[in-house]
Image: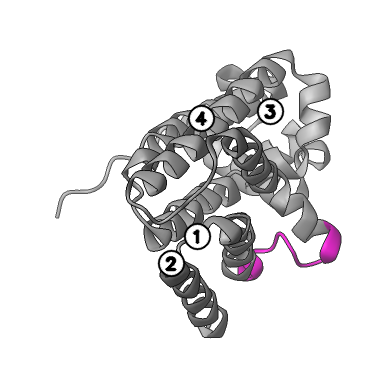
Amino acid sequence: MVKKAPRRTAERILEVTLDLFNRFGEPNVSTTLISSELSISPGNLYYHYPAKDELINSLFDRYERSLSELLNASDSVRDVEDAWFFLHTLFELIWQYRFLYRDLNDLLSKNRRLETHFQWVLKNKTRSIRAMLDAMSRHGVVHIDSREMDATSTSMVVLLTYWLSYEYVRDPRRALEPESAQRALMRGAHHVLNILVPYLEPAQRQHLMSLVSAYSQAPD
């Protein structure tokens, strides 16, 4: 049996850092805690990532690459069911890097690179949601005046960006724990799509309600 090669230290550091940031929030995680969790010396950690910001930036780069790939699929959304799964997948990615959203204002105030790159994230989320609405319009499932497109896209992006903050305020002790994930993501996808209810073709509106009902009753 061929043994698997050990994971590179730099990769392990990022994985453990992401887990700690997600569990405790980035401001509450020190490089000392990270090195202790990894059972390596602080010097070994600093060799790979000389500053905490470099850890944050590396994790953000990963998120940004995955997000870009996902957003490019928005113009293939044809109907409510496609939109439901697209948004749920988007929320899953946000959940995977939830420390960015949990501590967003604090991170942006301290990290100029994140400040500028997150503006790109917002622009591309908005572009992607607009492409999704255009595609749904072409397939006749959404009927929305072109003059309302920009405001509707922006409203959906605001919900996407701040949904986890809302969940956290609702239940600070449990909202961002792994066992809460599926319910939180389902609620997020529902509320983002709910913005489209006035514009949906009747059968698609009914299908959205059926999807929400089915996922609400499903076990975690």
Considering only vertical position in the picture, is 97 above or below 172? above
Q: What secondary structure is found at the residue carrying circle 2?
A: helix
> In the rendering, which numbered label is found on residue 200?
1
- Residue at position x 65%, y 28% from top? 56
Number of other residues with Cα within 10 Å of mark 4, as a class: few under 14, some 14 to 19, many 20 or more: some
Q: Are marks 1 and 2 in contact (CB under 8 Å)?
A: yes
Which residue corresponds to mark 3?
42
**Position of 193 compared to 30: left or right?**
left
Q: Are marks 4 and 3 in contact (CB under 8 Å)?
A: no
Does residue 172 show up?
no
The magenta-colored residue range is: 169-180
Which residue corresponds to mark 4?
127
Sequence-wise, the earlier of marks 2 and 3 is 3
Residue type for callout 3 = Pro
Which residue corresponds to mark 2?
204
Considering only vertical position in the picture, is 19 above or below 149? below
Residue type for callout 4 = Arg
Does residue 106 show up?
yes
Between marks 3 and 1, how big is the CA–CA gap? Answer: 55 Å
Residue situated in front as seen by the camera: 49 or 68: 68
Number of other residues with Cα within 10 Å of mark 2, as a class: few under 14, some 14 to 19, many 20 or more: some
> In the rendering, which numbered label is found on residue 108?
none
- Residue at position x 59%, y 43% from top? 97
The C terminus is located in which quarter? bottom right
**Position of 8 compared to 61: left or right?**
left
